Image (spheres, rainbow, N blue to C red):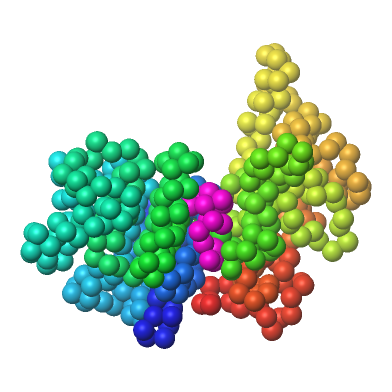
Amino acid sequence: MSETGHPLLVVRNLEKHFPVQAGVFKREVGRIRAVDGISFSIEKGETFGLVGESGCGKSTAAKAIMHLIEPTGGEVIFDGKNISGMSKDERRGFRRQAQMIFQDPESSFDPRMTIGESVAEPLRVNGMTDRERRRSIVEGLLERVGLDAGDADRYPHEFSGGQKQRIGLARALSINPELLVADEPVSALDVSIQAEILSLMEDLQREFNLAILIISHNLGVIRQISDAVGVMYVGELVERGPTEDVFGDPAHPYTRALLSSIPRPDPHIERSGMELTGDVPSPSDPPPGCRFHTRCPEVIQPDGLELDQTDWRTILTLADRVYRGDIDPQTVRESVLSVAEDGEREPEDVTLSEFEGRLREDFDIQQELEPTAVDTTIHHAIEALYEERPEVAAERLQETFATPCRDSRPASTTVEGDQVAACHLLETSVEASETVPATGDD
């Protein structure tokens, strides 16, 4: 806890949307929901890891938390104070207490300034006019991060990537912050250097009682250094909790898929990686319901339906494309003729049987699925597409293959202790009294 008795950092329903503009008058025609309502907190001296695939919104979240970009909505509360409501002087004080390390150490320094000048810059900006004192602090910090005091007079191009990241740590610590935000701090470094930097960060955290928010797509990095972890997917937190709980017993299918992708350096262990198929959603047009349902291998089936999960996934992928209007009958007909190398017929001459065969092959849907009612629904939906009635096709698919995973957004459910995940699978197995709002605070 901070001196106020609250967590040092509280992120509540944070949003960052970017407008999509078009036309001469730059009218807004949509929004990219890069960060769409995430909540978590960090205690003083604690490390919180934010993990997820590239493009899920991790780095945008870090910049919005630091107010390097203004959030669209939500609150960021630091040491009991809402950053958005701070005056200019208060915001300057926040900058002294929260520092950021960026992903690329190569572009983090002005090549015209010596390392000593770069590390001393925060001190100078914050009013330390005594040059000798600044020099003494810089030299002490350089030695603390594993470099020599004399390196202060050298220029950035004279250092390796790992050394530059050490210098970045020294610069961030120069004004004695309480919070360190590290955005992919080791992703550009060799594996052996990564371990050194992470170990150094842990040492500095213990020495200065730092709170750290670390952003990474590397699960090994997050597990090594984090006390708690949040898993992001298309702008949302799908799971969060103590690191060992989330890694040891992941509750969300996406978390399980991420963890199954970690390589194991033992040829005798059979790899059981979970292959994700289906479409990756765009943050400018996220799907309804659970955003992971377009790729999830565990989507809930309608009552009375017990399809093989592989078959179920292929049907859902077809249905999602139909719902979005992404299947163009003319393109399918042209594909049939192209594969058959039939240049004598026109697209209008393609038969329903050929059209259906092409779509079933494209989506890996068996020619004769069991039960028969399922296969009949797919046939009728494809027939409606063939007749260029996509709304009828969507209606038929929805009637038979409706799933809560697409129809409604899952609430965040307490799994056990502080572990929380947003998945409809959990809502059927956890008492309603343990369910918390999807965008609620901890």
Look at the picture and state if 37 lies above or below 6. above
Front residue (pair 131, 43) = 131
Q: The magenta stretch spans which residues?
A: 216-230
Position of 164 with respect to 363 (left or right) is left
Left or right of 264, for residue 212 = left
User: Does 58 appear above or below 93?
Assistant: above
- Measured from the top left, where is residue 15 in percent x and y? 43, 65
**Residue 268 at x, y = what percent?**
77, 38
Look at the image and tell me in which quarter the N terminus lies.
bottom left
Picture residue at 56% right of the left edge, 51% below the top: 220
Magenta segment: does it hold 208?
A: no
Query: Image quarter for residue 333?
Result: top right
Seen in the picture, residue 7 relative to 54 is either above or below; the reply is below
When the figure is inspected, residue 350 is found, relative to residue 173, above or below; the finding is above
Which residue occupies 52% across, 52% down? 221
Residue placed most toward the observer, 47 or 372: 47
> Can residue 24 be spotted in the picture?
no
Q: Nearer the viewer, residue 372 or 412?
A: 412
Residue 408: horizontal and vertical position, in percent? 65, 66
Whether residue 175 is visible to the viewer of this picture, yes or no, is yes
Residue at image position (80%, 49%) is 309
Which residue sits at x=75%, y=45%? 272
| Residue 122 placement, left or right of 81 | left
